[in-house]
Amino acid sequence: MLQKLAELLKREHSYYTDTPRSATLELTYRCNLTCRTCSVWKKGFKDIEKELTQTEIFQMIDQLKAFGIERISLLGSEPFMKESFEDIFRKIKQRGLKCFITSNGVLMTPQHIQALVEVEVDKVIISIDGVGERHDQIRGVPGTFEKAQANVRALLQERKKQKKRKPEVSIHSTLSRLNIDQIEPVKKLKEDWGVDRVTFQYMVETPKEKVEETRFDGARIASHRLSAWSDSLLFRREEVDHLRATVRQMRERGEKLDFAMRALDSWSDENLLNGRVPIKKCYATHNHILINPFGDLIPCSNIDDLPFGNLRKATLEEIWLGSKRNEFQKQLNHNFFPVCTSCANFSMTPSQMFKVVSGGTLR
């Protein structure tokens, strides 16, 4: 409890002093899957030659360390698609930084698995949206579930073999109308696979009109990476009812609900039906640095067509303290942009956390 309180106070200090302590490197937009709930992979294999090189990534990691960053998260699309990926997470750990990796779990080789444990990567998060064929249908490639399952079990076995406590291995599931009936089956994977945690979140879906309305200096700055392919996959009334019933049954069985599930259950029906995130503060643009595969420092996942600057042309400090980011923050602090109500980086304020704990509703 004291540790969580300390982390919360640190987060608030970071927000009000505009001093980020974590960063995410989107290493590549390439992916081996074609997930229904994601459009990032559609950027895929365009401009591969413009991606940061290993040397440039190493220089960037050094800059992040010097800037006070304590944790680096590695994402893709699929980070294991990036050449020399093992060298990248080794470099992060060599610099004394925490390292989190989010992956679909399919491309991990025995060499990767051994290295992840050897250097003690702090956390490996495997995205699983259903069990068996349901997962494969959502991910667009047959056999995906079985490959992820085999690799996760191999990773846990290697951790045991090396007598290490790290990495923490968790399953993270994105809920939509495609898999609302998969909460219980996915939750059971904690026991079946032996992972440390299973967490859930509601999918983010940005209405296309909000993307077009999100502008800065007259130009559109949001992208359609989080927009629906065709029909919306947000919850309808039947999925909302299913969510409520599932959580109620868990409580009746005396199961301990993790905070993320309790938080999701605290969303109002209206917000769930409309996919409207109850955001009150933008922690993402104050506490966190996001860098895309080409070295652009961008505001967040929703607003990714506004580079504040490129690390090939300027230092991290110059970009973070620069006029472009300063003007953007002024506008954001005055009023959220239209896409902010579909925030992919939502973090609750302390008062919202208290509301969840006390059984209130987030609106």
Image: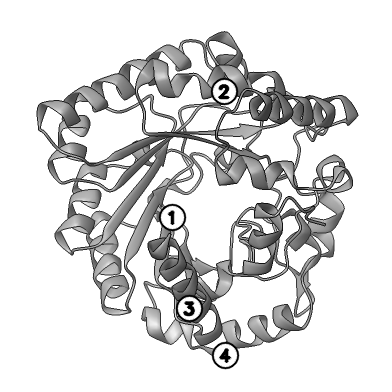
Distance Cα–Cα, label 2 vs label 4: 41 Å
Residue 215, given in percent of the width and then of the height, sits at 78, 71
User: What secondary structure is found at the residue carrying circle 1?
Assistant: loop
Distance Cα–Cα, label 3 vs label 1: 25 Å
Dot placed on the residue nearer the N-terminal end, 3 or 2: 3
Mark 4 neighbour density, 10 Å: few (under 14) some (14–19) many (20 or more): few
Check the picture and name the quadrant holding the C terminus.
bottom right
Say which of marks 3 and 2 sits in front.
3
Dot placed on the residue nearer the N-terminal end, 2 or 1: 2
Residue 67, given in percent of the width and then of the height, sits at 32, 79
Q: Residue at x 70, y 66 (%)?
A: 221
Q: Is residue 303 above or below residue 177?
A: below
Picture disc at residue 323: 4
Dot placed on the residue nearer the N-terminal end, 3 or 1: 3
Say which of marks 3 and 4 sits in front.
3
Which amino acid type is marked by label 4? Ser
Distance Cα–Cα, label 4 vs label 1: 23 Å
Residue 147, given in percent of the width and then of the height, sits at 38, 16
Picture disc at residue 14: 3
Q: Residue 52 falls in which quadrant of the image?
A: bottom left
Picture disc at residue 139: 2
Say which of marks 3 and 1 sits in front.
3
Picture disc at residue 293: 1
* Colour pattern: one colour
**Left or right for 97, reference 248:** left
Q: Residue 70 falls in which quadrant of the image?
A: bottom left
Q: Residue at x 76, y 49 (%)?
A: 206
